Amino acid sequence: MADNGLEDAAILLMSLGEEEASEVLKHLAPKEVQSLGETIAKMKTLPRERVDGVLDKFAVVAADQSLLVPDTDEYVKAVLRKALGDDKANILIDRILTGGDVSGIESLKWMDPGSVAELLRNEHPQIVAAILVHLDPDQAGSVLKALTERHRNEVLVRIATLDGIQPSALRDLNEVMSKVLAGSDKIRKASLGGAKAAAEIINLMGSAIETSALDFIREADNDLAQKIMDNMFTFDDLEKLEDSGIQALLKEVQSESLIVALKGATPEMREKVLKNMSKRAAETLREDLEARGPVRVSEVEAEQKEMLKIVRRLADEGQIQLGGGGGDDYI
């Protein structure tokens, strides 16, 4: 985002008011929120022409004065807290308004993956795993991509076998990141890690890394590898496919299998499928679904698994892209 564009966005947000601005910030990435917050904090007064130009550009009635808010520091605090909640907002507020050095595990969420990987490169896989489960899966996946293959695979094994983290361990981890975590030993251990967490991360890393990681995990624990695979892409996740992906899938699925599978689908999933069919085919499918009586759960699950096998095959062939697997990788 160019400097002028960033200033324009900041001016527009300031003219919207706290409620509306916080709604906008909820949809932005951490880096974008930080950049906008820092820009707003630096703006005390502005030339009227500058403000009018921005407001005209966004078809908003020009402000009566160029001083948009009486106290920009308080405005930044209020907007960030409404958009992100107190915990995340306080991290940014300290960084934006005081220039404070925000450290600890939470601060990693606001760093680029390459920097996080560099910090963790020489740490024990168990420590890296315990830290990465605190990050969003896409960020954790990007961090893992920057590690060596063996280090990455060892970390994934430990993520998949992690069943929680005690508060005392969390404090130790934060000391590794140069900050002691405030808290009490009475706090229940955080429910982090496990096969599902590993699956969510692997889903976002691309097919080459996925294959290597699963092969490594399978050698160590075949059952664990299967649990991860079972969590990697579920039938409900089909709703996240692009329309073109759904259309490619429908070409491969028999009508009878589709009917049974959709009997156990969410209304949203059914509509996703129906809207990607011709009008006549959609009407026929609706009628068939209504006419079909109760179906055993085991039959529904079996047909859904068969559809997922087709999805995986199409993904391997490059016809469907799943997750956010980065670059040209398909999974």
Image (cartoon, grey):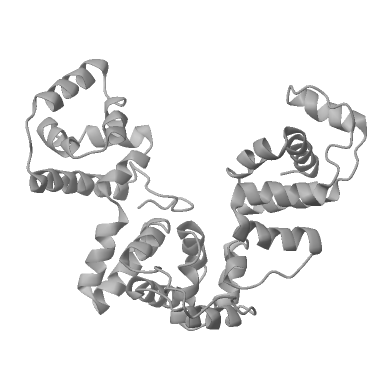
182 with respect to 232 (left or right): right
The image shows a total of numbered marks equal to 0
Q: In which quarter of the image is the N terminus?
A: top right
Above or below, comparing residue 221 to residue 62 in the picture:
below
Residue sticking out furthest to the front: 186
Residue sticking out furthest to the top: 280
Above or below, comparing residue 94 to residue 299 in the picture:
below
Residue 235 point in image, percent of width and height: 25, 46
177 with respect to 149 (left or right): right
Does residue 29 appear anywhere in the picture?
no
223 with respect to 14 (left or right): left
Q: Image point 71% across, 48% down: which residue? A: 78
- Give the camera-side residue of 218 and 106: 106
- Give the camera-side residue of 34 and 211: 34
Above or below, comparing residue 304 to residue 284 in the picture:
below
Q: Image point 59% across, 44% down: which residue? A: 26
Residue 135 point in image, percent of width and height: 50, 63
Q: Image point 27% across, 33% down: which residue? A: 267
Residue 94 point in image, percent of width and height: 73, 63
Q: In which quarter of the image is residue 157?
A: bottom left
- Give the camera-side residue of 231 and 313: 231
Does residue 83 appear anywhere in the picture?
yes
Q: Image point 67% across, 60% down: which residue? A: 90
Above or below, comparing residue 127 to residue 86 in the picture:
below
Residue 253 point in image, percent of width and height: 17, 36
